[in-house]
Each structure stands twice: as C-alpha cells, then as structure tokens.
Image (tube, coloured by chain):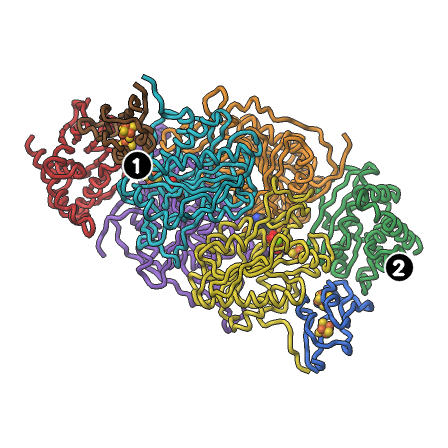
Chain colours: A yellow, B cyan, C blue, D brown, E green, F red, G orange, H purple
Amino acid sequence: MKTLLKKPESLTDAPMHYCPGCGHGIVHRLLAEAIDEFGLREKTVGIAPVGCAVFAYNYFNVDMIEAPHGRAPAVATGVKRVLPENFVFTYQGDGDLAAIGTAETVHAANRGENLTVIFINNAIYGMTGGQMAPTTVLSQKTNTTPYGRQAALHGYPIKICELLSTMEGVAFAERVTVSSPANIIKAKAAIRRAVETQLNKEGFSIVEVLSQCPTNWGMKPLDALKWVEEEMTKTFPLGNFKDKKGNGKKGGQ
Amino acid sequence: MKTLLKKPESLTDAPMHYCPGCGHGIVHRLLAEAIDEFGLREKTVGIAPVGCAVFAYNYFNVDMIEAPHGRAPAVATGVKRVLPENFVFTYQGDGDLAAIGTAETVHAANRGENLTVIFINNAIYGMTGGQMAPTTVLSQKTNTTPYGRQAALHGYPIKICELLSTMEGVAFAERVTVSSPANIIKAKAAIRRAVETQLNKEGFSIVEVLSQCPTNWGMKPLDALKWVEEEMTKTFPLGNFKDKKGNGKKGGQ
Amino acid sequence: MANQKAKVLEEKCKACGLCIHFCPAKCIAYNEKKFNSKGVHPALVEKEKCIGCRQCYLVCPEIAIEIFEE
Amino acid sequence: MANQKAKVLEEKCKACGLCIHFCPAKCIAYNEKKFNSKGVHPALVEKEKCIGCRQCYLVCPEIAIEIFEE
Amino acid sequence: MEEKIISAGFGGQGVLLIGKILALAGLSDGKQVSWVPSYGPEMRGGTANCTVIISSSEISSPLAPMPDSIIIMNKPSLEAFEPLLRKGGLLVMNSSLIDVKPKRSDIKAFSVPANDIAEKDAGNVKAANMVMLGAYAALSDSVSMDSVKKALEGEMKGEKQKFLPVNMKALELGAAAAKKK
Amino acid sequence: MEEKIISAGFGGQGVLLIGKILALAGLSDGKQVSWVPSYGPEMRGGTANCTVIISSSEISSPLAPMPDSIIIMNKPSLEAFEPLLRKGGLLVMNSSLIDVKPKRSDIKAFSVPANDIAEKDAGNVKAANMVMLGAYAALSDSVSMDSVKKALEGEMKGEKQKFLPVNMKALELGAAAAKKK
Amino acid sequence: MQKMLMEGNEAVAESALRAGCTHYFGYPITPQTELSEYLAREMPKRKDCFFMQAESEIAAINMVLGASSAGARAMTSSSGPGISLKQEGISYIAACSLPCVIVNMERGGPGLGNIAPSQADYFQAVKGGGHGDYRLIVLAPNSVQELADLTVDAFDLADKYRNPVMILGDGLLGQMMESVEFKKSSKNDVSKKTWATRGAKGRKPNIINSLYLNPVELEQVNLKLQEKYREIEKNEKRCEFYEMEDAEYAIVAFGIMSRIAKSVVNEARQKGIKAGLIRPITLWPFPSKKIAGAAEKTKAFIVTELNAGQMVEDVRLAVNGKKPVHFIGRLGGMLLTPQQLMEKLEEVAK
Amino acid sequence: MQKMLMEGNEAVAESALRAGCTHYFGYPITPQTELSEYLAREMPKRKDCFFMQAESEIAAINMVLGASSAGARAMTSSSGPGISLKQEGISYIAACSLPCVIVNMERGGPGLGNIAPSQADYFQAVKGGGHGDYRLIVLAPNSVQELADLTVDAFDLADKYRNPVMILGDGLLGQMMESVEFKKSSKNDVSKKTWATRGAKGRKPNIINSLYLNPVELEQVNLKLQEKYREIEKNEKRCEFYEMEDAEYAIVAFGIMSRIAKSVVNEARQKGIKAGLIRPITLWPFPSKKIAGAAEKTKAFIVTELNAGQMVEDVRLAVNGKKPVHFIGRLGGMLLTPQQLMEKLEEVAK
Ligand SMILES: Cc1ncc(C[n+]2csc(CCOP(=O)(O)OP(=O)(O)O)c2C)c(N)n1
Ligand SMILES: Cc1ncc(C[n+]2csc(CCOP(=O)(O)OP(=O)(O)O)c2C)c(N)n1
Ligand code: SF4
Ligand code: SF4
Ligand code: SF4
Ligand code: SF4
Ligand code: SF4
Ligand code: SF4
Ligand SMILES: [Mg+2]
Ligand SMILES: [Mg+2]
C-alpha cells in the first residue's frame, strides 16, 4: 500500500484549530504543496498575520514570524531585504491586509517588493468573532453592521486585486476561490504562478482567495460555499488581474 | 480707487511662512476664494496636515484643526460625522496623504466620506528638508535618494488620482498644477467643482495639485515651474479622473 | 485509478461534510457509530465504491484525507 | 481693463519673480532701491504700462498683489 | 449562602449559556450573582468554561479557585476541574461524552447521558446543555427550578423562541434523570 | 581660554556656516569645540542662529546664555542677542541690513557693511557671511585666520569648490575692513 | 430602574449612551469587542448617534479627535496592541485639551500576548505611553456596576477639564456579567464648548492645535496643562478604604485584583490578621496622600497587581520609605489566587 | 583615528555602520533626519547594506522586526510622535526577544509640539510606552563622542540580551557638532543567531512569536523576560559620578542636562558649595543602588530634567525617603539655564 497524496511536507502534524469547513485549511495545503513542488521548504520564511490564521506558524513546517496585525508586508520587507534569495510569503486576512494594514500593503505592492502575498478574503473578521471587514459585501450583516453594510455609512467593499493591479510594482494578481474541487485546482495554479513570480524576481505577487467562514457567516459549510459562489463573486469577480509575464487576461469575467 | 481683487476673506492677514515661489500660497488663495464664492466661510472646518502647510490654521480664516501627520482624513471624518451640514476640507502634502496617511486616505475615499481633499503633490517632503516622497519621480534626487529614486529600491511614484478614482466612494478626482496663470485658472475650476461635489453630497472629492518646492528641489522658482510642467507631468498627467456628475473625461491627456 | 482509494484520518476529521458533498461516487458518509476525540462523527469512505478521483482530498480543509494505492 | 491696475503690497513680497515672469506687459520689476523687512527687493509695478490683466495676481504665492480700479 | 459553580465543556456545547441561565435565575431569586467566562483559543471546538457565583451577600472575588459545584460536558474538562472541586462538592457530568469515572471519592458525583437524552428524548443533541442544567438544578439548592425556567424563557425570545420547547423539555428530562437516582 | 560665540541672522544667510567654520578652525587649532544650531520655523526666511564654543579644556555646557562674542547678520537678531552679550564682549554686526546702532555701551561693537562688501567687492551678495566671519576672526583671538581659511577650503570641496574664490575673497575683505578701524 | 444582568463591556456601552456619548469610533479587538458591538446595535436607533468601525485604531483615535473638536462626546475603546497604536493620537488629544473617553480592557502582553485579564498597561495609562508631558485621568472600576457609574463620570470629567479620560479595565471585568442598575446619566452641553470647531459663525475662528514652534509658547502651554493637572489632583482623587480603621497590613489593589484582595481581607480577619484594603479608584490622580496617611498607622503594605510591579512604584513614592512595601503579582494573563495573596500576607505578618 | 567635527545624528549613523548595522528603516522627522540622510548616502556604497525610507514609522519598526528576525543588525530612529507610533512594534519586538536599536532624539511635546530639545519621553522609554511588562535598555549619552561610543554598545547589548535597546537623545544632542573619534567597532555574528528565521535548512523551523493564548505559557515567557531583566540590571548599570566624593548636594541629570549641570557644579564649587553630579548613563537599568549609596552621604538631591519631572520618580524610589529630593525642570523645548539651576542649588543649600 503506497500513499499517493497526503499532508505536504511543508505542513507540520499539528492539528489545525480552524472551524469545520473553514477555507483556511485548504489554502494552507495549497501553499504548502507549492512550496514543496518548487523545493523551497528550507529557504522559506513565512509571515503569519493576526487573524484566524495567526497560528499558521504552527502549521507551516518552515521558518515563521508572527507579525503585528496588518504589518506582515512590512515584516516581510525587512526579511526579504536581508535575505533576497529566500522565498518569503505573507498569509493575511482581509482585516489584516485591507483595513489596518492598508498602508503596508499598498506600499509593499508599490515598491514591487519581491514577496508573495496569500490574501484570505472571507468578508469578515473571523478571529474576533464576526465584525465587518473592508471586504464585507453590501447589505451583509455582521456584528458591527447588524442592519447590513450600507455604502453611505460603512463604505464599499474594497477590491484589493483591482486596486493593487493599478500599481506598477505589482507583477501578479489573481482572485480565486476554494469553493469546489475545480476552483481549488485553479487556486493552486494561481498560487504556483505567484511563487514563480517571486522566484523570477518579477516583483510583488498576490493571490486573493475568496474563502468561506461558516462560523461567522452563521452558515453550514456547504451553504457557505454556495454563498461564496453565488454572492461574493458578484462583488469580487474571479480571474487574473495582472501577470507581468503577459499571460494574464483581464479579470472580472 | 476701488480694490477689485485682493486677499479673499477666508484668508487671514498673517504673513505666510512659505518659501519664495512656493505653490502652497497659490493653492491657499484658490481654496479660500472658492469658500468665499460659495459663501461657506462660517460653516467651514478645515484640517491642516503636518508638512509645510501645517500652519494653514493660521492662514485660513475659518475654524481649523491641526491633525497628526497623515491622519487628516480620519480627523475630518470625525468632524463631518458630527457636522454633516458643514463644509469640511483637508489640505495635505504627499508625505502626509500618500505615505504615512495611506490607510486613512484610502478608507475615507472608500467610505465616500463627503469631504474635500486638497492634495499638494510636490514630489518631496518639504517641511523636513527634502526627503523622498511617495510621489518623488524616478531618478529624482532627494536627501534620502541621493543617487536618484530607483524603482527596485524605492518603488514607483504613487499616482493618487489614478488609484483613488478606482474606488466607488470617490465622486471627484482631478489633477491640476499652479505652474502658470492658465493652469491656475484650471486649478481653481477643479477646486470649485470639488467644493460643489461636497455641497451636493456626492461623496469624496480630491484635487491633486502638482506644486513647486523650489527650496528642496534646489531650483529657482521659475525653474521649478518649468520642472513641474516638463518633468512632473510626465509621471503625473493632468486631467480629470473622475466626476460622478458625468462631465468628467478620462485623465491623462 | 481503480486501485487508488481515499481514506479518512479519523482523528483529524471535523465533520464539515465537504468531502461527502463533493464525492462523485457518493461513497463517503459520517460514521455514526463513532465519536472522535473532537466529539464528532468522522467521515468514512466506503472503499469498494471509491473511484480514487481525489475530489475529497482537494476539498478537505483538515487534510484529513489521504489517497493511497492498494 | 485699461483703468484696472496691479499693485504690490511690498511688505508681503518675497521676490520670487513669478509675477515678473508672467506679466505680458513686462511692467513688473524688482525695486532695487529698497529692501523690505524680509530683506529682499520687493516687486514694483510700472503703473503706466500695466494693462490690468491679473496674471500677476493669479501667480503671486504671497497674495502680495492687488488689482484696483483707478 | 454562597454557591460557586463552574460549567465547562467544548466551545459550542453551550456551557456559557448554562452559566448565564444560572446567574439570571439567581438574580430573579433576589441573590447577588456574577458570571465570568473563559474561552479557549478556538472559535469552535476548543474548550470553554464559566464561573457563576450566586450569593446572598456581596460577592468579593468573582472567581472560584475551589468551586462548590461543577457541571462538566466533556472529558478534558473533567480532567481540568475535578481536582479543584471542594471536598463534598457536587459534580454533574455528561456521561455521553465521558467514558471514565471520577477519580475522587470525597465528592458527590452524578452522571447524566446528556447527549443521548437530548438527541433521543428531547429531539435535538444541541440541548444537551439544558439536560445538564436541569440535572444540576434538581440536585442543588442554589436556585429554584422555577427561576431557571423563567430565565430560559427570557433568553429564548424572538428568533430563538422556536428552540424554547426543545430546551424546556431537555431541562425537565435532566431534572427527572437526576431525581431518579 | 574659552570663547563662546553666537552667530545669528536670517535663515539662508549662512550664519550656521560661519559657526561651523569657526568650530573647524578651533578644532584644527587643537581646541575643544562645540557647535549648536537653532532654527526658526521657516525653511527659508526665518531666523537662525548657532552657538560655538572654542575652549582649551573640556566643554561642559555647549550653550551660551551669556556669549563672549556675537556675529549679527540682521536686525531681529540684534534685538535678540545684544542684551545677552557679556559685559566687554564683542559684537560684529552687518550694517548693510541693520539700520540702527547697538544700544549698549559696555561692549565692543563693530559694524561691517557685509552685504555691500560681498555684493560689490567680493562679487556675490551670498558671501556676506564670510565677510562677517573675516571681520570677527580679525578682531578676536579665539581662532587663527589660517585655520579659518583652511576650514573654509575644507568645506568648499567638490561641487562647492567653484564658490571658494569668492568666499575666500569675502573673508579677506572682512578681515581688512576690521583691521581698518 | 430594574437590576439587569449585564456584561461589563456592554454596561460601559449602555452607560456611554446615557452619558450623551453620540460618537463612537473603534476597531475590533478582544476582550472589548462586545462594547462596540453593543453600540453598533444601539447607536443607529438613536437620532444624532453615530457608530463607526474605523479602518484601524489609529484612524479611530483620530476620528475621536475630530468628533471631539466638533463638540461631540466621543469615545473609543481597545486593548493592548490597539491602545499602543493610539499613543500618538492620545498625546495630541491631551496636548489640544480635547475631552474624550478611551476604554482599555487590558489583556495579557507584551506583543500579541493573549486575551486573558491583565493589569500590565498601568504604566502606559498613568505615566503616559505617548510622547511629552501629559496626563490622562485614569479610572479603575472593579465591578460591572462601577464600570457603568464611572463611564458617566468619565464623560463629565473629560468635559470639565477638557482632558482625555481613560477607563482602565481588564478582560475579566469587561467580559464578566453582574447585576447592574443604571442610576447615573449626563448630557453633552455643546453650547459651553465655545472652543469647538463648528464653523466660525459670528466669532473669530477656533483653532485646535498642538504645534508651538516657539519653545516659550510651548512651555506656556505645558505650564497650563500642568496647572490643570494640579487642579485635577486637588479635586478628583478617589480611593476606597476597606477595613482600614485598625488595619496593621494594608493590601493595595485596583480593579479586578481589589475584588480578590477583599476576599482575602475578610478571610485574614477571620484568622485574626488585621488586614485592610486600599483601593485606588483614580489611578491618576493617584491617591498618594491617603496612602501616605495610612503609612502612619499600618505596619506594612502589600501591593498586588496582575503585572510585574507597576502601581507599586506609586505606592512606594507615596509611602516614601516610612514602611515596607511588598509586592506580589502574576503575569501574562494569570490571575493571582486568594491563596497566594493570603500566603504573602501571612508571610509579611509573621 | 583623527578627530572629526561631526553632528550627533551623523555620529550615531557612522557608528552604526561601524557596529555592523546593515539595515536601517526610518521615516523622516526633525530633529533626527540627518541620521537617516547620512545612512541614505553611505549604505548604498556598502555591500549587504540596505537603507529604506519606510512609508511610516509603523512600517519602519515592523521592517526592523523582520530584518532582525532574519538575523541582521537593524535600526530605526525617530522622535516624539514617531516614537509613539512605534510603541506597538516595540512591545512586539521586546516580547519576541529580538535585538534591535531604536534612536529617539526627543523633541518638545506633547502632540506635535516643536522641534526643540526635550527629555519628556523618559517615562515612555523607561516605563514602557507600549502594552505589557517589558523593558528596553535605555542609553542616555551626553556628548557626540558618547553618542558614537554608545551606539556600538547598543548593538552589542541588543544581541547579547536579545532585547531592543533605545538610545535616548534629544534635538540638541542630535544636531550639535563636536569633535568625535570613532574608536569602537563591532560586528554581527549571524552564526550565533540560531533562533533567526533564515530558512529551516537542516533543522526544525524557527518561530518568532509573541502569542501565547494559554496564560500559563505566557506567564512563563514573561518570567523569562523578567529573569533576563534582572540579569541586565545586575550587569549593565552605568552611571557617572562627578565631584561626588565629598558632595553635600547631588545634582542628578542625564543627557544634555548633565552638561549644564556639570558647569553648575564647577561654578558652585568655586562659590564654596560642595555640589556633585550623578549622571545615569543607563536610564534602564537605572543605577538605583549607586544613588541610594550617595543618599547616605549627601544632604539633598536636586534632579533636573527637561520635563515636568520624570526621572525624579526613579531617584525618589532609589533614595526612598532618606534625603529630600528636589526637582527643577523646563518644559516644551525650553532649556534650563545654568543660572536657574544655580539658584535652585543655592536655595536648597541654604
Ligand atoms: C493592533 C490590533 N488590533 C486589533 C487586533 C484584534 N484582531 C485580531 S484578529 C483581527 C481581525 C481578523 O480578521 P481578518 O484579518 O479578516 O482575519 P480572519 O480572522 O477573518 O481570517 C483583529 C481585529 C489585534 N490583535 N491587534
Ligand atoms: C508621526 C510623524 N512623523 C513624521 C513627522 C515629521 N514630518 C513633518 S512634515 C513631514 C513630511 C511633510 O511632507 P509632505 O506631507 O509632502 O508636505 P510638504 O512639506 O512637502 O508640503 C514629516 C515626515 C511628524 N511630524 N509626525
Ligand atoms: S472563524 Fe471563520 S475564518 Fe476563522 S477559523 Fe472559523 S470559519 Fe475559519
Ligand atoms: S520647503 Fe518647499 S513646499 Fe515647503 S514652503 Fe518651501 S518651497 Fe514650499
Ligand atoms: S477519491 Fe473520489 S470517489 Fe473516492 S472518496 Fe474521494 S471523492 Fe469519493
Ligand atoms: S472534508 Fe475532511 S474534515 Fe470535512 S468531513 Fe470530510 S474528512 Fe472530515
Ligand atoms: S495686471 Fe497684468 S500687466 Fe499689470 S502688472 Fe499684473 S501681469 Fe502685468
Ligand atoms: S509674485 Fe508676489 S511674491 Fe513673487 S515677486 Fe511678485 S509680488 Fe513678490
Ligand atoms: Mg477575514
Ligand atoms: Mg510634499
């Protein structure tokens, strides 16, 4: 009996604390697989965010730093400028990357820092128990928008891929989901391409993953997948927004 | 003898501390004229930045708040949410608005805060004596890029109008200069339109003014004007980038 | 892939049901007879029916599924 | 606009030269005879030549220029 | 009179609600009450517990390093809290999920298969916490069953009202199970 | 021996450079030196001053609340610093921009039309500061003129070298003006 | 008014509404998130009230600066890392003499630490975590009822002195439920805020500012602040004495630790040890004189805090060598048990 | 090595290079900008050196966190408002036991204040402006030469204890020029940094972290930190005594104020007043024992600072009531003149 597929080497054996059906675990696996496939495990430095993925340092079997909330891109910049030949990634939630960390995100992107950012957009603050995220969609109810997000009061859901891909420093930007096996395969391809972008020293690469948070959406896991596909993608169209190598098509449809 | 044109009422008599030929003074006058013209002096609250315009609170003859560096949009949000019927503006430099204040800028814009932002892009940190700004153009020498700004090390000049106009909350965005009488007239029109945008409760309005800093560019005032027109506009094309009212044409040419 | 099969690492399973939903062969179900130490009924593959298509591996957030060759 | 003229508020002038440059009538120059309290030679309008076109008012960063009607 | 109770289990088992209803019941009995939660790291699936104090006089410390009673919904919690229970104290434990016996003999221990009762008899496994609460209320003098019921009613209003009958039933089944012994 | 000097004027007049060259000259004379700047709010056009101490022993405080000499380039600075000068101290002032006389009679005051000399005789009004420095150096024993020249040379290297002749000339003209009196 | 069972965080929120707080700006962080969630539910129901989840703690404190400048009663809340991020803004607000209320429900630190109760931000709150010489009025309630009461006082004090007021609680206090009665209320009197920037109608412009490039001016501003601080020190010190009449050993504790300390005092008295409790309610101004007074009568002090020893310095400064001052604390979110405190007391009393 | 005339800020920069600092991240602010401008010129000339103007102070301190994690000797510098913004990052760096050097050239506060010299960030530096129980090693040089020397020590201490070190100067010190000789140098020994995150090659992954949700663990982390702090207190206290042998009156001053105090001591001696100077060079660890020792012999202490009275608390804690401790300070960027200090001394000596 031969095991063909199992936990990638770049993940540890630690049991993950994510809720049943949460997208974080899937994305962890995809990234770890990509690191394995490129043979990067021993030269990887990962930056964990503050958010549900804060414990990523226990799950990735690579050198890890736990950054202050929102500052992962700055921390990663510090690392990368010391170790330009290492593979450096950040793994961040939407609150982390698109609210408190806006300045660090925009400027790392603008500098074209040769980093790979895995961005988990679950339209909510997971770890703190379900408050509005910058990516919460209009009329979505959260604990801090109990009557639904309204543009006039709370602003619009921020579209990170669209925003960042306007910047020259950004080499690769793609939005994917992990809502079905087929989408997971696409997500994996995007993550691989982002890793490659860094290895080729092309600049900043980001993969935005629309990811389910069954717990704070108050849904069963399968309903959450459906909500990603039917609701979230309306605001956040899937697709590649930038690929400096040229094979990127305009995202959105 | 009748005086036809003089210091607008919305400016005080205090002598301004700006260097000879500096663009700040011109923009102060344009904004003050617009406030006068719309009859807003007594219901205006202005927010001064940290930067050369920090003393704006001494020059504008309206209620003023001096905000911490970069935080003017947050301060203005606080004011506006208390006094939605007042006219609230921020006046910010490029370091203030596009470096340390990136998050506050992006989020106020994204919320469509009904504010007017006057953004002085002089491609340098004026007040602190000539360090790189986020808008410093490539190969420009500053005290912190003594060998010229290089994209790989220092990133690209940030194009605020282009970036912000992608956001739904932004109602008006235009880039102008004060490099000649003709351009000053255009700048005034843009500022008037931005004020109007707020009065119509259309959302966030921003006028980006390419402005000369003869002192820190190490140029004579006239050479500085020439540099604005010949060099800066290459990176920062003039024009309207957004006008929700619909009469905005695409900027760039 | 007839000789390739999926198996669930029961202690890792959190009973989210994703594998069950996406299995084209409808050969995964909760093992109602058992609670694992997380207090849930873990998923169980009906080996005979499994066609080794890996869909369950792809979707499992806990990496609680392995694919093996008999 | 023939009866409209520009005048410089000398104490406010910082001698940046912008008005001088943009005056189409070439009727502004530094007053070399005088230092103001800022230690510079302020601009001075040669009233007769002035055509009241307001270009100098527009560009003056110090609002040191006023336009008046005779 | 002062009763210090710890209710403990997995997050999601509703152990905090047990405590809240006890506190509300104590309050309506005219007592002083306090309720202190403690969460584990996980949003779901971790351990959680709360400390409730019901007292006829001012409550100084709201903590209970040595509780009078413990309501235990899972095995890790038994291991954590059994040693702390005061001598002669009351342990109510969920035998559906705990396959071991209490180690101490100087306490009053009582087992109730709460998951089974909730799933089979009350009709919803999620009401296991109310089975436990019912059992505790029946075994202890600290609160009256009436107040507990009133508190439960108060908590299950509006959207949650639909869950009230199941939970009420669970409460009663728990009390009945306790009285049987 | 300890000499405390304040050099003051508009920002942009080069008063800080006067001080720096004095300090460098002192250093090459083998003295202890310190130089402390003070800027006004404006980048240009405000007031600026610096304090230089040249001493044959360790310098405790680098400040000079009561300086031995003051080099004054404009009127506001005269108003600010004349009262502080120690009794018998040396005042060198730029009479091109100062249309008043010193008020005190218990000091040694010396006027030099620095702007005029710089503009007309040295060929660049910007060298007015070196005229002042030259005058001071000639009037005071604190530094040797040689060291001042060497220091000026050291400062005007590379891109700035082209300004050296004018500044050197200004220095000498200042010294000459001082010696004339 | 009926007694309600309520969480500490929610009691602060409800009380803020009753104190005329119309503007709240915050960013989620455990263990105080319930405070904002309560206001997110309640504020939209009320006229003129406005709740905003800001993009960050920094934005939140600066929105408070703006709203307060515009004359509103404004508030923010956070914990540990978030409060650290607010330090620049707090220094500005203090320098501008603006009123506002800041809640810190402390958690375990330093760094990301954990979400367990702690008192390790005492120094930051009391000595000033931001730059420059400024002071916050720091209130340290020890029950849900007092959280409610002091929240109203906080808004009144803030307006009275035009000074930021911090409510320093901890995760336990914020998340525990107790019965509470809302007895106090207050309201904002905008008409008295003649300094507010609401449009310069019929008056000279108002300026809210903290820049004074001329040191002579900035010193004057600072001296005025210091004068105000002396005034606050004179008027606003609050302190509870419990069983101190004949106490030989004074336990000094604030906030949640004072509850534990009280139970130990009771127990000690039963054992025949004459213990008492001194509970500073205002951490700044610190009740130094009352403590100095107690030093005349007691044999020793035991300061107990959930930190490595912070308030103990202020107690030592008050006691000034007259009597020994002992310390016992726990770190990183651990609670000191009554037993541990009892042992320490017995050791000191030996 | 020849003596050079150099500005304090530049001396720190040059010394940092000589101490093997390869990575600098900062954001401009007066009065320390010359430090970064020097490095902006020099670093690009050197192999492996990297200078970055960050988008903000917050980004800068977090880049330092990253670079230090990766094993580099990293540094940042700022003043007043910028240092306040760094407090969260500093707390994290301390919690993660990362070495780094932070320079604060203090300016007048609070708020935007001004750019004149001040010492009003003493509390922030020494008591911890960020959240939680942590300590910075705080060095307070008083001359350009000492700025240069202590910068090298700062990097060594940081690595030795895996702790952030702050150099606390002020605008005057940073911008004054004096002669300086670069005698000291040092270098980074990456091979000893086995904890650094440089890729898990042939070993288990390294984790840099400050989250310990379990209070038992976080308390252990804190106890280890406290143990380290005791160790530092044992080994690293530095203090200068000047004319203290027979002094009846001890002036206590640090940084630039110690220079003014020294001139007053000299003057006082001429007038027949037996004054001496105690100058703490490490503000944390604070030389309490030496001061307590001096309290046995002197009649009184005069603490003088450019603030409203901050270090004076640590002096009082050290003296512990044995002798009177007087205070004289100036605020908002004003300098205390020798005359004022002399008057105070004469008043106390009367
Ligand atoms: C400075 C700071 N502010 C706030 C927090 C509290 N906090 C922890 S996680 C989090 C948000 C997490 O949301 P997101 O980034 O979307 O990640 P998710 O949990 O959804 O994966 C917040 C606000 C913190 N730890 N530090
Ligand atoms: C938090 C903080 N960081 C840094 C500074 C120092 N500072 C003052 S003005 C300024 C930059 C000004 O540049 P810009 O915003 O472009 O305005 P300009 O002077 O060019 O008009 C900086 C960094 C400060 N006062 N506060
Ligand atoms: S709260 Fe949401 S994002 Fe966080 S682990 Fe649970 S499901 Fe995932
Ligand atoms: S430094 Fe530049 S921006 Fe500032 S006042 Fe002078 S010219 Fe204007
Ligand atoms: S491998 Fe395919 S068929 Fe087999 S269990 Fe998994 S999903 Fe079902
Ligand atoms: S997907 Fe994984 S965790 Fe979910 S039920 Fe299947 S095996 Fe269990
Ligand atoms: S108004 Fe026109 S013509 Fe007259 S001075 Fe001005 S620019 Fe010249
Ligand atoms: S533009 Fe204004 S400041 Fe400049 S020279 Fe003319 S009058 Fe003077
Ligand atoms: Mg999220
Ligand atoms: Mg600028």
Determine the quadrant in which ligand 5 lies: bottom right
User: Does the beta carbon of the residue at mark 1 sit less than 8 Å from ligand 8?
Assistant: yes
Q: Which of pointers 2 and 1 indicates the residue nearer the eye?
A: 1
- Where residue A96 sits in the image (x, y, percent)? 56, 52
A35 lies left or right of F144: right
Badge 2 is on which residue? Answer: E120
User: Is the C-beta of the residue carrying label 2 under 8 Å from the nearest atom of ligand 6?
Assistant: no
Between G263 and E80, the one nearer to me in the picture: E80
Q: Secondary structure under badge 2?
A: helix
Residue lying furthest left: F180
Q: Name the residue beneath numbered marker 1.
A: B21
Name the residue furthest front.
D2
Residue C50: quarter of image: bottom right
Which of B153/B181 is in front?
B181
Alpha carbon distance from label 2 to label 1: 86 Å
Amino acid beneath label 1: Gly
The chain identifier of the residue carrying mark 2 reads: E
Amino acid type indicated by mark 2: Lys
The percent position of residue G179, horizontal first and vertical second, equals 75, 37
Q: Position of residue B3 (x, y in %)?
A: 34, 20
Q: Pointers 2 and 1 in contact (CB under 8 A)? A: no
Q: Is residue G308 among the parts visible in the rendering?
A: no
Outermost residue toward the top? B1
